Every structure is written in C-alpha cells, then in structure tokens.
Image (cartoon, rainbow, N blue to C red):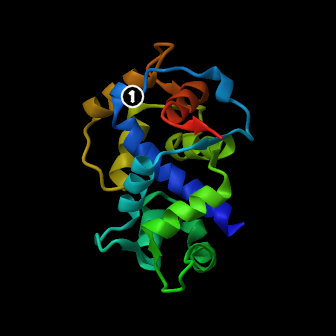
Amino acid sequence: MANVSFLEFQYKLSKCRMLRKPSRLFSRDRQNSGLLTSFQPDLRELRHVFDKFDANKDGKISQMEYKAVLRALGQGNMIADVPKIFQVVDLDGDGFIDFKEFVEVHKQSGGVKAMDINSAFCTFDLNRDGKISAEEVMQVLRGLGEQCNLEDCRRMVRAVDTDGDGMVDMEEFMSMMTQTMKRG
C-alpha cells in the first residue's frame, strides 16, 4: 500500500511541470479514461519529479525532503507513512531514495493509473467544483515554491482548455496528463 501512496504523490509533482509546458498540452486522447489504464512516463519526466524531491541536489531523497514536499502539497496526512514508503523504495537500505531506486519502484508498479491522475486533479481542484482555475493553479504552484503570476497560470489553463470555458475539467486534465506517456 505504501508503494501506491508514493506513486500518487510522485505523479502530483510531475503535473506541475506539465502544466508549465503549454506547447505539449493540446492533444486530446479520450481513450484514456478507464481507471485501471496505466501510463508510463519517460525517464526525463521521472528525473524532473525526482529533482523536485531532492531539494539539496545531492542526488538522493531523504525522508525530511520527502516530508517537506508532502507538506507543500497539503498532503501532511501522509507524513506518518513516509518511513513505510522508504522501507519499500530504499532498495539498498542506505536510508535514502536515489534515482535508480525511484525509477525501479515506478517500473515495478506498472506505471501511473488513471485513478492516480484523478487524485492529482483533486490536488489542483482546491474548491472541489470539478474544474481547475488559473487561481488554483497559481496557489498550488506557489505552494511548491514555483515562481508564477496569474497571467502565466491563465496561459497554462488556456493551453489545456479545449472547450473554452476558462477552466480545466477532468477530461481536459486527463488528456493533458496522458499525452506524453505511453499506454501500459
């Protein structure tokens, strides 16, 4: 179970990067709506997520770094699970997660499930209205320490907003999130 929590959180972080890259967000792939469908991010995506965890840039993730990111994302309720997560993921037993271990746990899990993407959507949908606004994107990104202004966030939302309502709904979010991944 700890493995699933780790992957859900991993994916929440990768979304932040993808929201900042509007040029890659225009494709719509409606076939990817099944909750058990899995997707495989490439190594570049995984490296970006790993680097978000590795705050001191020493090439490994400590439990303290992991907990800090959980707090920044409003996932403080998962902090008690961190030692269990590290027991599963820290394959060499050194007390840290290096990039090789990070990739390995991702491979063993079978990728990211559509339900993980749904969970990520909920991270951005702060008011729980079923849509993500530019203001919500800005609040989440700033919570992660990203420098962004409201106009930047509006451009990100417009790049994903295919129905023109000024918001990102679940279908648009799913399409954006799965565009750069291979179906597993």
Q: Is residue 32 above or below residue 100?
A: above
Q: Is residue 169 visible?
A: no
- Quadrant including the C terminus: top right
Q: Is residue 73 above or below residue 114?
A: below
Q: Residue furthest top?
A: 164
Which residue is pictured at 54% across the width and 25% down the height? 172
Question: Is disc 1 surrounded by few (<14), some (14 to 19) or many (20+) residues within 10 Å?
Answer: some
Q: Is residue 146 visible?
A: yes
Q: Position of residue 64 (x, y in %)?
A: 43, 78
Q: Is residue 28 above or below residue 21?
A: above
Which residue is pictured at 33% across the width and 50% down the height? 142
The residue pinned by badge 1 equals: 24
Q: Position of residue 132 (x, y in %)?
A: 49, 33
Q: Is residue 8 above or below residue 155?
A: below
Which residue is pictured at 60% across the width and 32% down the height? 130
Q: Position of residue 155 (x, y in %)?
A: 32, 26
Q: Secondary structure at mark 1?
A: helix
Q: Quadrant of residue 53?
A: bottom left
Q: Position of residue 25 (x, y in %)?
A: 42, 27
- Quadrant including the N terminus: bottom right
74 or 89: nearer the viewer: 89
Q: Quadrant of residue 104?
A: bottom right
Q: How many marks?
A: 1
Residue 160 lies left or right of residue 183; in this view the side is left
Residue 172 lies left or right of residue 46; in this view the side is right
Q: Residue furthest bottom?
A: 94
35 or 76: nearer the viewer: 35
What type is the residue that disc 1 sits on?
Answer: Arg
Which residue is pictured at 65% across the width and 65% down the height? 3
